[in-house]
Image (cartoon, rainbow, N blue to C red):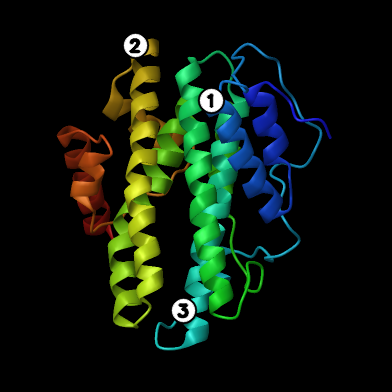
Amino acid sequence: MPVPAELRTRALQCLIEPDPAAKVAAVYAMAEASREGACMPDPSAPLSSTAEIPGRPDKPELVPPLQVGRRAMNTPEGRAMLIHALAHIEFNAINLALDAVWRFPGLPAGYYTDWLQVAREEAYHFSLLQEHLQRLGYSYGDFIAHDSLWEMVERTCGDVLARMALVPRTLEARGLDANPPLRAKLAQAGDKQAAAILDIILRDEIGHVEIGNRWYGYLCRQRGLELIPTYADLARQYRAPTPRGPFNLEARRQAGFTEGELAALQNNNTSETLAK
């Protein structure tokens, strides 16, 4: 298959690739071509696809989230299950970044190169986790997984504002909160390599959420909308999960959340807890 010179078309080609290793290699190559100026975005290009989106391997088997089960840190298999779950999140994150590149026309060139950067870094995270999983005697696909992250990507296919609000700013931002406790558990279990990988992921994910925040703000200003009430409206409309604390407030501040947004997040979380 010829390699497209246009960035969004090439991102779509990467997105439909089912093999994880081939997808990672294609993303790396696309990022390098973009850096060299050989793969530029055409925001006006009319794109469509008849292929299955996203491309992914036959395994892991996808099941409802409650069927995935708990992961015990005191056994090698339990730690491998956790690393596998994290690898699955990062594989989905590659796909969601590629989808953000190809699906939405008419945006500034920086939007597309920002999301290409996210795809490149998510591919790196997946590779780190896959390599560590192999050191533990397993591989991606050896355990079951769920698909809740991609479900929100599908729900927001018709509106880039909803996508920016509810994927990077909501689902990916939850990773900022979840990362430190997971890292502590892995370090306590003696898996220092996994803990170091989570340090890399947290560092980069702050930047990914910041990109989502920045483009959400851009789109709100472009449409004459206020950040906080618009987010609340979109969360209700698209049935987004309510983030639950404790929150990594420092990481969220670094990712561009305003103090008003953080206060609304904490107040909403408190109100939901009291209502139970």
The quarter of the rendered structure image containing the C terminus is bottom left
At 55% from the left edge and 13% from the top edge, which residue is drawn? 106
Real-space Cα distance between discs 2 and 1?
A: 16 Å
Q: Which mark is residue 224?
A: 2
10 Å neighbourhood of mark 1: few (<14), some, or many (≥20)? few
Judge from the rendering whether residue 194 lies leftward or rightward of residue 258; answer left or right.
Answer: right
Task: Classify residue 161 by image quadrant.
Answer: top left
Q: Is residue 185 visible?
A: yes
Real-space Cα distance between discs 2 and 3?
A: 47 Å
The secondary element bearing badge 1 is classed as loop
The three-letter amino acid code for the residue at tag 2 is: Gly
Judge from the rendering whether residue 242 lies leftward or rightward of residue 61; answer left or right.
Answer: left
Residue sitting at the far right? 1
At 51% from the left edge and 77% from the top edge, which residue is drawn? 80
Give how far across and how far down residue 102 sits, in percent.
62, 27
Task: Classify residue 60 by image quadrant.
Answer: bottom right
Residue on which disc 3 sits: 79
